[in-house]
Image (cartoon, grey):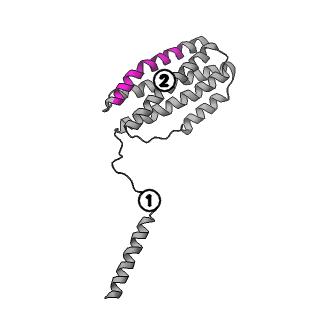
């Protein structure tokens, strides 16, 4: 009988030790996101789009000699950095885990832009800004109907700025022709 107890005790100790060595880490199941799928997509795409526009605008500040393009790039960096900071606060409040990187597609756009110079660069940059802001208007308009008041309010507050960016980019583009 003593032998059986020692065997059971040994098996229990081995089981307990092996459980501690599990390569999977425990998860806190209370840390679930507080955003719906639309909110998660909005936060992810909003952050990535903003980072892409800031990177492209930093290139424009270095590569462009057109004062309107450089001024526009300055405005993009300031406005998108501020919007990104606010969106990161929403990301944290909603416990949304999104990568802090730019996708391969956006990297490719930045690299293509970096390869251009002079008037070709200015046109490509402004065309990129027009396309990106048209997409952002759709993204932010859709977010005005999100289930989260935080996301709704942010998108409603930010939409006029995005529209102003689009209008400015279109005006600059028409002057580049």
6 to 38, vertically: above or below: below
Front residue of 14/113: it is 14
Residue 167 makes an appearance in the image: yes
Asked whether, in this view, residue 67 is left or right of residue 15, the answer is: right
Residue 73 rendering spot, x and y as whole percentages = 58, 20
Question: What secondary structure characterizes most of the magenta part?
Answer: helix
Q: Nearer the viewer, mark 1 or mark 2?
A: 1
Q: Quadrant of residue 34?
A: top left
Q: What residue is rendered at 36% in x and 78% in y?
A: 9
Which type of secondary structure does the marked residue at label 1 adopt? loop
Q: Earlier in the sequence, mark 1 or mark 2?
A: 1
Q: Quadrant of the C terminus?
A: top right
Residue that mark 2 sits on: 133
Residue 121 rendering spot, x and y as whole percentages = 65, 22
Which type of secondary structure does the marked residue at label 2 adopt? helix
**Marks 1 and 2, how far apart at CA:** 42 Å
164 to 116, vertically: above or below: above
Residue 162 rendering spot, x and y as whole percentages = 46, 20
Q: What residue is rendered at 61% in x and 20% in y?
A: 123
Question: How many numbered discs sit on the rendered protein?
Answer: 2
Q: What residue is rendered at 45% in x and 26% in y?
A: 136
114 to 17, vertically: above or below: above
Asked whether, in this view, residue 56 is left or right of residue 31, the answer is: right
* Farthest residue, direction top: 175
Residue that mark 1 sits on: 24
Q: Quadrant of the N terminus?
A: bottom left
Q: Quadrant of residue 114?
A: top right
Which span is picked out in magenta? 150-170
| Crowd class of label 2 (few under 14; some 14 to 19; many from 20; radius 10 Å) | many
Q: Quadrant of residue 15?
A: bottom left
Q: Inspect the magenta stretch and tell me whether residue 162 lies in it.
A: yes
């Amino acid at each position: 009988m003593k032998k059986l107890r020692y065997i059971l005790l040994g098996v229990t100790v081995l089981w307990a030790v092996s459980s501690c060595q599990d390569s999977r880490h425990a998860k806190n199941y209370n840390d679930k996101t507080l955003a719906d799928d639309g909110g998660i997509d909005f936060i992810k795409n909003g952050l990535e789009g903003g980072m892409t526009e800031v990177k492209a605008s930093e290139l424009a500040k270095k590569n462009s000699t057109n004062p309107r393009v450089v001024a526009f790039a300055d405005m993009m960096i300031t406005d998108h950095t501020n919007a990104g900071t606010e969106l990161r606060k929403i990301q944290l409040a909603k416990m949304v885990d999104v990568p802090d990187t730019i996708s391969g597609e956006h990297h490719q756009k930045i690299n293509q832009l970096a390869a251009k110079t002079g008037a070709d660069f200015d046109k490509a940059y402004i065309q990129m800004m027009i396309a990106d802001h048209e997409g952002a208007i759709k993204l932010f308009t859709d977010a005005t109907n999100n289930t989260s008041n935080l996301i709704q309010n942010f998108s409603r507050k930010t939409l006029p700025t995005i529209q102003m960016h689009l209008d400015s980019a279109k005006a600059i583009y028409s002057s580049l022709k």
